[in-house]
């Protein structure tokens, strides 16, 4: 597992979700200021939970199919997948502490 967020596309999204036991997907876009605000938190948590959680980033402008499939209406949106199934989601930027609590909640 990576110690930094892995970029994914519409083409490889399902494969990545199925290959890794626990995945947090960061839906973002280059123009999105709140996305840029949470990026360092996502990167830091990817390092901290390397080997336990796989963090991936999906650019919604370049990859519209997956956001549409999961009804992502605003960004940043974070989707949490465990065993290939969606188990949680966060819409909008949030501070590190509550975000990390959401990540830890699904580790058990």
Image (cartoon, rainbow, N blue to C red):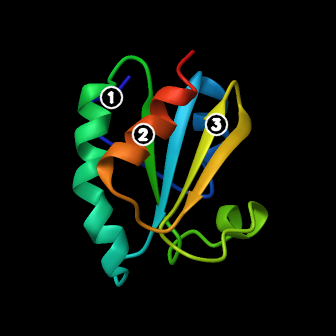
Contact between marks 1 and 2 (CB within 8 A): the answer is yes
Disc 3 designates what residue? 81
Residue receiving disc 2: 55
Left or right placement of residue 15 versus residue 23 in this view: right
Is 81 in front, or is 6?
81
Image position, residue 71 (x, y; %): 75, 68
Within 10 angstroms of label 1, few (less than 14), some, or many (20 or more) residues?
some
Rendered location of residue 15, percent (x, y): 64, 36
Of 9 and 74, which appears nearest the observer? 74
In the figure, 47 relative to 24: above or below?
above
Q: Is residue 35 left or right of residue 91?
A: left
At which x and y percent is residue 48? 26, 27
Q: Position of residue 68 (x, y in %)?
A: 73, 70
Judging depth in this view, the residue of 63 and 27 nearest the camera is 27
Q: Quadrant of residue 36?
A: bottom left
Q: Can you say whether 19 is above or below 41 in the image?
A: above
- Is tag 2's residue or tag 3's residue first in the polypeptide sequence? 2
SS class, disc 2: strand
């Amino acid at each position: 597992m990576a110690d930094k967020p892995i970029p994914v596309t519409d083409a490889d999204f399902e494969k990545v979700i199925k290959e890794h036991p626990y995945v947090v997907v960061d839906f973002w876009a280059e123009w999105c200021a709140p996305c840029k605000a949470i990026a360092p938190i996502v990167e830091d948590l990817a390092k901290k939970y390397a080997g336990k959680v796989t963090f991936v980033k999906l650019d919604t402008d370049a990859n519209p199919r997956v956001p549409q499939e999961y009804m992502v209406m605003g960004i940043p949106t974070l989707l949490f997948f465990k065993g290939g199934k969606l188990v949680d989601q966060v819409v909008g930027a949030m501070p590190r502490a509550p975000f990390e609590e959401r990540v830890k909640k699904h580790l058990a």
